Image: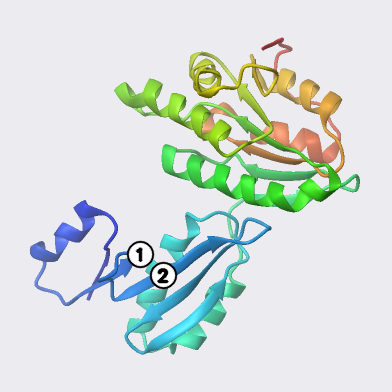
């Protein structure tokens, strides 16, 4: 049995390259295992109706971010082929937790600030998903006067698409009404802020800082109860140090001091 992603045209095309029986998963209407009514809860957790050849069931995941839906469907397809019932699959998906550090780790501090550490890695798709999760989580904090902060760094290995992709992420942060964008690093971070600026972030909604220490200094001086802070970049940027500093109260080890430019 070949379990293939129906939403990826390159993977879907593999149907014609195998003699195995194929099972398609995804949000496509012809997928054997598919998700309908995909949405994010107020906490930024994905929920959807799981459809299988043997029936339907509701899933609300403990993980954060819409990008986990595709992962869940892949697992559901394998589980269904292994003989699990749709209700058993839905229950397992709803109870699944993360096994890796720095992948949408959500921690609420004693003062009410929520830190979302997704600093393990980043690409355009996961960056968009994380920003949408941040926007959903921010809705829950608005009643307390909370704001959303996107602390973002370089998405590595994008080649000639790097400028366009960083610009697009900066623009998306504005479209999702993220309160504050903090772009951390060099040229790529400048492109993130440029995208936000070109989308209409002309005041202090976006800021470019040179390194992690400058980001921590800025955040420590401006965060307030109810705020939600997303920290995300490619692993090489080391933004997990920002999340660690916000959670343990320590400085950023090994980072040089820097300045912020608006």
Looking at the rendering, which quadrant does residue 18 occupy?
A: bottom left
Residues under numbered marks 1 and 2 in contact, where contact means CB atoms less than 8 Å apart: yes
Q: How is the image coloured?
A: rainbow
Expressed as whole percent of the image width and height from the top left, the position of residue 192 reads: 52, 23
Q: Residues within 10 Å of mark 2 (few under 14, many from 20)?
A: many
Between residue 12 and residue 36, name the one nearer to us: 36
Looking at the rendering, which quadrant does residue 159 occupy?
A: top left
100 up-or-down from 56: above or below: above
Expressed as whole percent of the image width and height from the top left, the position of residue 67 reads: 47, 54
Query: What SS does tag 2 mark?
Result: strand
Q: Residues within 10 Å of mark 1 (few under 14, many from 20)?
A: many
| Residue hosting label 2 | 35
- Residue 156 visible in the snapshot: no
Looking at the rendering, which quadrant does residue 164 occupy?
A: top left
Residue 223 as seen in the image, left or right of residue 59: right
- Give the numbered dot on residue 27: 1
Quarter of the N terminus within the rendering: bottom left
Expressed as whole percent of the image width and height from the top left, the position of residue 178 reads: 64, 36
């Amino acid at each position: 049995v070949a379990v293939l992603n129906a939403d990826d045209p390159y993977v879907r095309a593999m149907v014609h390259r195998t003699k195995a029986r194929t099972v398609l998963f995804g949000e496509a209407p012809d997928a054997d295992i598919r998700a309908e009514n995909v949405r994010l809860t107020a906490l930024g957790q994905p929920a959807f109706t799981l459809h299988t050849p043997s029936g339907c069931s509701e899933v609300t995941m403990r993980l954060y971010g819409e990008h986990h839906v595709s992962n869940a469907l892949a697992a559901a397809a394998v589980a269904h082929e292994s003989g699990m019932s749709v209700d058993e699959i839905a229950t397992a998906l709803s109870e699944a937790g993360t096994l890796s550090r720095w992948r949408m780790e959500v921690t609420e501090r004693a003062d009410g600030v929520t830190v979302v550490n997704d600093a393990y890695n980043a690409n355009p798709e996961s960056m968009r998903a994380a920003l949408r999760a941040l926007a959903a989580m921010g809705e829950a904090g608005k009643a307390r006067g909370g704001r959303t902060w996107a602390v973002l760094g370089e998405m590595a290995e994008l080649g000639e698409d790097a400028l366009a992709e960083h610009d697009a992420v900066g623009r998306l942060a504005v479209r999702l009404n993220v309160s504050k964008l903090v772009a951390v690093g060099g040229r790529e971070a400048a492109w993130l802020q440029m995208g936000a600026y070109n989308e209409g972030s002309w005041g202090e909604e976006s800021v470019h800082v040179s390194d992690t220490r400058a980001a921590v200094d800025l955040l420590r001086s401006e965060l307030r109860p109810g705020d939600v802070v997303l920290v995300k970049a490619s692993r090489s940027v080391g933004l997990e140090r920002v999340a660690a500093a916000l959670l343990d109260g320590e400085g950023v080890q090994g980072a040089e001091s820097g300045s912020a430019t608006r």
